[in-house]
Image: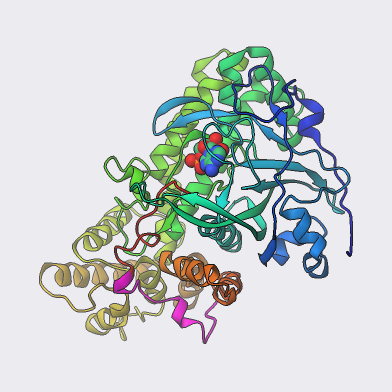
Amino acid sequence: MKQWSLVFDNKFVQDLPVDPIIENYPRQVRGACFSWVTPQQVSMPSLLAYSKEAAELIDLSESHCQTSYFTEVFSGNTQLDGMQPYASSYGGHQFGNWAGQLGDGRAINLGEVCNQKGQRWAVQLKGAGPTPYSRTADGLAVLRSSLREFLCSEAMYHLGIQTTRALSLITTGEQVMRDVMYSGDPQLEPGAVVCRLAPSFTRFGHIQYYAQQNEALLKQFVDHTLRVDFPHLSDPSPSVYLQLFEEVCLTSCTMVVNWMRVGFVHGVMNTDNMSILGLTIDYGPYGWLEAFDINWTPNTTDKDYKRYAYGEQGKITHWNLYQLANALYPLIKDAKPLEKLLDDYADNYASQWLLMMMEKLGCSSVITGSDSDLIQQLVDFFKLHETDMTIFFRRLADLPLDQETFDVAAAVKQLTPAFYPESFEGEAEALLISWLNNYAKRCRADVLMPVERKELMNRVNPKFVLRNYLAQQAIEQSEKGDQHLLNELLDVLKKPYDEQPGKEHFNQKRPEWAKHKVGCSMLSCSS
Ligand code: AMP
Ligand code: MG
């Protein structure tokens, strides 16, 4: 078997206290940040896909990825020299309630690779077997959810949005029992392991869990976080902890504004699913907006309260930051500056969101008094008539808006492929026409020239996103042993802002069959 090695420097396990128990059984772990665990052996690992770009982060070439050794290592069957597998403890608020200990229940960290550029990449397997944090669950993952995590992580990266990365998608050869919609009808599904990479996998919930225990453990963990994740913030002190919080507020804000821009709905924004680095983390029952609907959530568990719906994500980030501020408070002991930073987050989110929406419309960064109204009028139209967000904004960039050539009827026609159904009249049509006239006027008054407008719009409005039904089709093919669509999507989603002639079929509205199909518009946490 062709072999190779990686350079590890495992700061997490070097710096932080370990659980003294080494047997692997579910338990409460107090006073420690991690437990040693070993990935479960699997019978028939098979590599379905890998990300060439993610592999480069840890100095692996495509020829490394194509070795059977790669599949053995990233399925968890073989360990490289320097790997020290462990699961970390963390807690979190789930759907607004403190849930106590959660932890890496089905994630096993292998170590931290130092690449040739001197960057640190933590390497983690998801679905490699139980840990002390697995509670009553099995620590495993199925192909359906692993494929969704693999593809979406890489799609997010190529959209230019902060995210954990996905190196590989490997089926294990084992069967895993899951009840997809919690309907009392469990089925066996193919098991899989995804290897994820991130500078670190630290969550708000880590800091919360240690704050719940004692100040010394909290300080030890936060000081470690400063050294590893925020090396520019040295010499821990109350003001440095405040700076840390300020940075988390800023990066979280950027992340969520970007989600809003591309129509991504995370689905489970519990505090244990919030990264301290502002990375999109834990791709579970996420979804992409088809129709622009601020109340839409793909997560059936949340269908009554819609706590994590598209339009709530900015506010929920604020709520989560509030919980992080509470956890950091013992190190700062002054509520005022924390409250100020939380208020700043709210202001910053509102202004960043407005700027982002105006960019989607192709307007420069100089906001005018009526811009909020222009956006509101468009949202009102979207409420009246179901409209595909991605197709709408992409087509909008093609409209000629100058006085001489602007023809509102032609503009409506040009936008037609974005509508479900395509023809409509009455109040919705009148509102669209009125909005288009206002919009054309606003663009003419803008400093951007028409070519600049189009160029800006095509930079912020992707043509290709991981439409819910496309992911589902890739899953169905993969489950039958055909990886063609999975790899084609991986490829198309590398250039989401490019026209990519010949790939238009990946930029089509949701077909009728997908409207109410499980896996397309309805997802659960069962993965
Ligand atoms: P999530 O909602 O996926 O972010 O997970 C919440 C918690 O449940 C985390 O502590 C996970 O590690 C744990 N968890 C989720 N699925 C499993 C599983 N299949 N086995 C063990 N733990 C799990
Ligand atoms: Mg999670």
In which quadrant of the rendered image does the N terminus lie?
Answer: bottom right
Q: Is residue 264 above or below residue 290?
A: above
Task: Give the residue drawn at x 64%, y 43%.
Answer: 129
Q: Is 371 in the magenta?
A: no
Considering depth in this image, is 15 or 228 the residue closer to the camera?
Answer: 15
Q: Range of the magenta residues?
A: 498-513
Q: How many marks?
A: 0
- Judged by its main secondary structure, the magenta piece is loop
Residue 425 at x, y percent in the picture? 13, 75
Residue 422 relative to residue 468: left or right:
left
At which x and y percent is residue 59? Answer: 83, 59
Residue 165 point in image, percent of width and height: 65, 54
Name which quarter of the figure residue 57 lies in. bottom right
Residue that extends furthest to the left in the rendered view of this protein:
426
Query: Which residue is found at the position 57% from the left and 34% from the top?
Result: 134
Q: Is residue 50 visible?
A: no
In the image, is 427 to the left or to the right of 58?
left
Q: Is residue 382 visible?
A: yes
Q: On screen, 120 above or below 521?
A: above
Instruction: Report the residue at 50% width, 66% height from top.
Output: 475
Q: Nearer the viewer, residue 254 or 121?
A: 121
Q: Residue at x 56, y 17 (%)?
A: 212
Compared to residue 422, the image places residue 69 above or below, namely above
